[in-house]
Image (cartoon, rainbow, N blue to C red):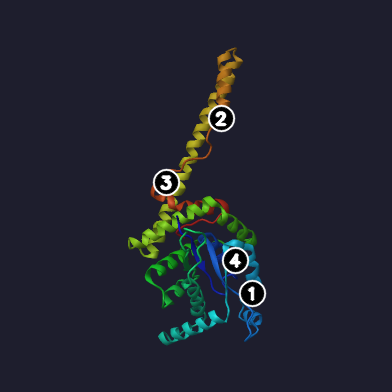
Amino acid sequence: MSLERWGSLSVCDHIDSNTLVANVLLYDRLVFPVFTEAEDRDEHEYWRDHGWDPDLQEKRIAQLDDLAVRKPWNKQRRDLFSDRLSELKNLQEDVNELDALHLTRRILAQEQAPVLAPGRPHPEIIAAYNSETGIHHDFSLEQGSSHKALQAYLVARRLAIPDIADTEAALGLAIDLSRDDDFRERRRDLFDWQDRTIEQGYTPGQAVEYMTQLTDKYNEAVVQAHKQVYYRFAFLIGGLALGIAGAGLGQPIAGASAILALVQFGTLDKKPVVEAGKARPMAAFHDIDLRMGLKFSGN
């Protein structure tokens, strides 16, 4: 059974709608460090002062519903964060806000996800970074996780490049697509492919470039498959036209041919079979383009 992949976010990753849309499309679920009231300070005011907008976070989590995983950003996790941040400061002098945000994602990624159902494996949690710098600065990342995080970031950046005029509508479409069973299966095929590239020694950049080539090949395969269906329709429509013309000339058998053509037309499998070969794991990007208008390309 395929394992789910979740993306862990920071306290402000709900702010940028374009990035959130990309993350919704790239992960089965998103793990949020959720605003939590605290006894030692006015947490709501603290979040507002830092520009994290706790009310917007609650709105986004409500929109995502079961695609969002709540992790209270409580005193226990904040204390762990402070300890890790102190360790980071001991290792490098120029610790900044970005480093702190990256650390939040990593803390959530290190927590084991719950078992979703008996017999199913624990989901894999990947820190959903929004900058390449953050991945390189994260002192505690293991090589495999680092490669997955950087791959996901590079993919998200390419999907998020277009300016989305109506971000609310785009987020709604992304949520609907992320719940679609066929899309989820295709996305997990993509996850499996990404894992194989790591095993084969591809760097994240090389993997994403190869991904671009395969996506182009998959799109070409879709075009060819649609052409085949079109030609089958055209053949039957041509037969139907000949049958009707023959019937007009007083040939009863031609009328029967026309009826047969109509029956064949009605029962024809209109769904194209895409023979994509090695490019099949890129089917998820075709779905995203078709439903969202977001192309995955080398730009």
Say which label, 3 or 4, has the lower sequence index. Answer: 4
At label 1, counting other C-alpha atoms closer than 10 Å, the crowd grade (few under 14, some 14-19, many 20 or more) is many
The front one of 60 and 118 is: 118
Q: Residue at point 41% right, 77% down?
A: 140
Q: Nearer the viewer, residue 149 or 293?
A: 149
Q: Earlier in the sequence, mark 1 or mark 4?
A: 4
- Look at the numbered discs 2 and 4 and tell me whether their residues touch, using CB distance below 8 Å: no
Q: CA distance from mark 1 to mark 2?
A: 56 Å
Q: Residues within 10 Å of mark 2 (few under 14, many from 20)?
A: some
Q: What residue is disc 2 on? A: 265
For mark 1, what is the residue? 54
Q: CA distance from mark 3 to mark 2?
A: 26 Å
What x and y, as percent, mark residue 75?
Answer: 57, 82
Q: Nearer the viewer, residue 67 or 223?
A: 67
Task: Kindly report the distance in space between the C-alpha atoms of the residues bearing marks 1 and 3.
Answer: 44 Å
Residue 17's label in the rendered image is 4
Q: Earlier in the sequence, mark 2 or mark 4?
A: 4
Looking at numbered disc 3 in the image, what kind of residue is underneath it?
A: Ala
Give coordinates of residue 205: x percent, y percent.
Answer: 39, 64
Quadrant assignment for the N terminus: bottom left
The circle drawn on residue 276 is: 3
